[in-house]
Amino acid sequence: MTGTHGQHDRGHGARDVRTRVTVFVALGANLVIATAKTFAGLYAGSPALLSEAAHSVADSLNEVFLLIAVRRSKRPADERHPFGYGQERYFWALLAAVGIFVMGGCFSVYQGVQALRTDQQESLRGYLAGLAVLGVALLADGASLVRAWYQARRHGEGATDPALRTVIAEDATAVIGVLLAAAGIALHLATGQVAWEAAASMAIGLLLVCVACRLAREARDRLIGEAVDTELRDRIGDFLSAQDEIDKVAALLTMRLGLDSVLVAARIDLTPGIDSEEVELVCLRLKRRIADKWPQAQHVFLDITEAPGPGEGPPSPTDPAPRMSRHGT
């Protein structure tokens, strides 16, 4: 069991290192891009560029949140948090979603409305500077997206790691936002109508709001206690049902406590004839078997009820409660 858990811990340690590298790549790209977009947007007076600058600033702040999440979620369990700190990953992902919504989405919509009210015209140099910055941003955001997407596909971590999912969502949105901003500037240049840039800015804002809402919903589901996927739950239930010592699995509850930690709580009826003195040993064996088969099941609680033996009827309401035994890691 020790070897299995050691391999489990090493595998997730390597995953965290990969995630940190991916987040650092995204952070570096966004800091450079945010600076360039801000200066170019102020120089050109472009609402689309300023919206993209706000988008990149929000993404940079979110990457800081994600780095904090990866570090703090690995803290060991203590008396105050006996199940560990794995859910911190989802809390900081929720803050990142709020940052995207407020700093990116709302500011972009505001910039679009302001552009329509002022109808400010840009110089030709402003157009060219804006398009050049967007070209650099497209390359940087694209490279960061490729890095994050490769990690998700190569190691199969995109569905479980909220930090990685947030980076992928941010980078994909950034690439789409750059294309929208470039289209708005180009149409403004061709027609002389600032409404095109305003529309691009508001479209970027609405896109960010949608992405933020989806990320926030996913983080909320994990924070309020989400069960493991149905396939894993069914496999654990089938495993328990197949044990010789178990007559019936009356209830099986699961909850994710983090990327590497799952809580399993089951109420099981033992087969008839098991001596009450053996209940503790049976419970320990079952817990070890579950931990060996699924190392992520770090907290296993079994509510053991002795089934009636041959010739024994069901207990009456006046009988003492059946012997229960709860075991956890």
Image (cartoon, grey):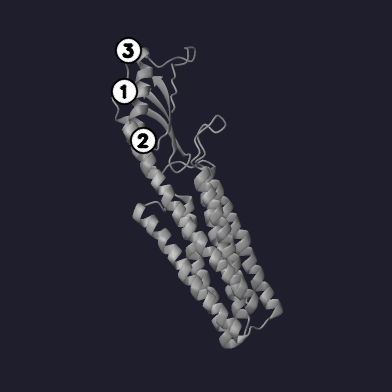
Q: Nearer the viewer, residue 13 or 224?
A: 13
In this picture, residue 155 sits left or right of residue 43: left
Which residue is pictured at 60% across the width and 78% down the height?
A: 197
The residues bearing labels 1 and 3 have C-alpha atoms spaced at a distance of: 19 Å
Say which residue label 2 marks. 5
For the question of whether residue 202 can be seen, the reply is no
Say which residue label 3 marks. 311
Say which residue label 1 marks. 245
Query: Looking at the image, is mark 1 or mark 2 nearer the viewer?
Result: 2
| Image quadrant occupied by the C terminus | top left
Q: Nearer the viewer, residue 251 or 202?
A: 202
Considering every residue shown, the one lying at the far right of the view is 118
Whether residues under marks 1 and 2 lie with C-beta atoms below 8 angstroms apart, the answer is no
Query: Looking at the image, is mark 2 or mark 3 nearer the viewer?
Result: 2
Q: Few, some or many C-alpha atoms within 10 Å of disc 1 (few <14, some 14-19, many ≥20)? A: some
Tag 1, which secondary structure? loop
Say which amino acid is labelled 1.
Glu
Mark 1 and mark 3 lie on one chain; the one further toward the N terminus is 1
Tag 3, which secondary structure? loop
Which residue is pictured at 65% across the width and 75% down the height?
A: 42
Could you say where residue 57 lies in the image, as x and y percent from the top left? 59, 63
Q: Few, some or many C-alpha atoms within 10 Å of disc 2 (few <14, some 14-19, many ≥20)? A: some
Mark 2 and mark 3 lie on one chain; the one further toward the N terminus is 2
Q: Nearer the viewer, residue 252 or 313?
A: 252
Say which amino acid is labelled 2.
His
Say which amino acid is labelled 3.
Gly
Mark 1 and mark 2 lie on one chain; the one further toward the N terminus is 2
Q: Which mark is residue 64?
A: none
Could you say where residue 236 lies in the image, as x and y percent from the top left? 35, 35
In this picture, residue 80 sits left or right of residue 267: right
